[in-house]
Amino acid sequence: MTPHTTHAPDTTETVATEAGPARITWHRARGRARLVLAVSHGAGGGIEARDLRALAAGLPAHGVTVALVEQPWRVAGKKVAPAPKTLDTGWRGIWPALAEPGLPVVSGGRSAGARVACRTATELGARAVLALSFPLHPPGRPEKSRADELLGAGVPTLVVQGGNDPFGRPGEFPEGDYELVEVPHGDHGFAVPKRADITQEEAVSVVTAAVVRWTGTLG
């Protein structure tokens, strides 16, 4: 048998929100938990994204409980994400369940989920924000910047960004009070081309190593 390193989810919980039922898949910390890292998906995919799966597999060994959050529109089987305001409503609705273990909660997400985390962090009392593939602007439209959302998070923030992300390459990001880690050659989903000098596995390891290190500084 081939050994596999994924950590089976402990529990899945459905949570009622004003935007409809959301779902949390809990990957509990091994040993004493220090933090809850809550991460949601983007507008075009779910919690099966490679970076979210990797965090759920890797962080529990470091005292971090990972909560993978599916927004109500995904739970309902819809193909298109609703307006940002509705996404924020769904995130607010699941927050009491995320905070219920009594641990500091890091608010996170990829792409559209990262925007939600930034917009609501201060209001919800997040310990910090993890922004995976933050969509700084629509592809080819740098003038439509969403930098104000990132800069307005108001809590310690880590951005993990693909070096070739069409929604914003690392060099396009403004100066600000946040940390940015680049995944070399990565696109918006952290996929790397076969010709790159980094394998797909190594690219994902950049993400998990950065988050392990950063969460270690949060308590």
Image: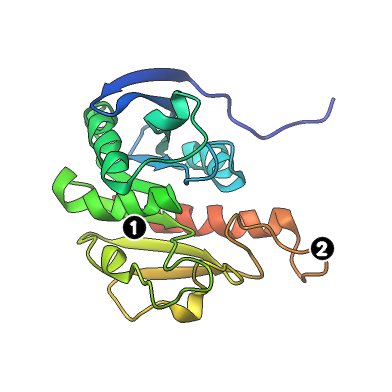
Position of residue 120 in the picture relative to residue 130 (left or right): left
66 is higher (above) or lower (below) than 119:
above
Colour approach in the figure:
rainbow
Quadrant in which the N terminus is drawn: top right
Residue 188, position as x, y percentages in the image = 57, 59
Q: Nearer the viewer, residue 85 or 198?
A: 85
Secondary structure of the residue carrying numbered label 1:
loop
Residue at the spot 36% in from the left edge and 72% down from the top edge: 145
Q: Nearer the viewer, residue 33 or 150?
A: 150
Secondary structure of the residue carrying numbered label 2:
loop
132 is higher (above) or lower (below) than 40:
below
218 is higher (above) or lower (below) than 39:
below
Q: Nearer the viewer, mark 2 or mark 1?
A: 2
Residue 60, position as x, y percentages in the image = 48, 36
Circle 2 is placed at which residue position? 194
Residue 196, position as x, y percentages in the image = 77, 70
Residue at the spot 32% in from the left edge and 54% down from the top edge: 129
- Between the C-alphas of marks 2 and 1, the distance is 34 Å
Nearest to N terminus: mark 2 or mark 1: 2
Is residue 216 in sight in this rendering?
Answer: no
Identity, as a three-letter code, of the amino acid under mark 2: Lys
Task: Give the label on residue 145, or none.
Answer: none
Circle 1 is placed at which residue position? 217
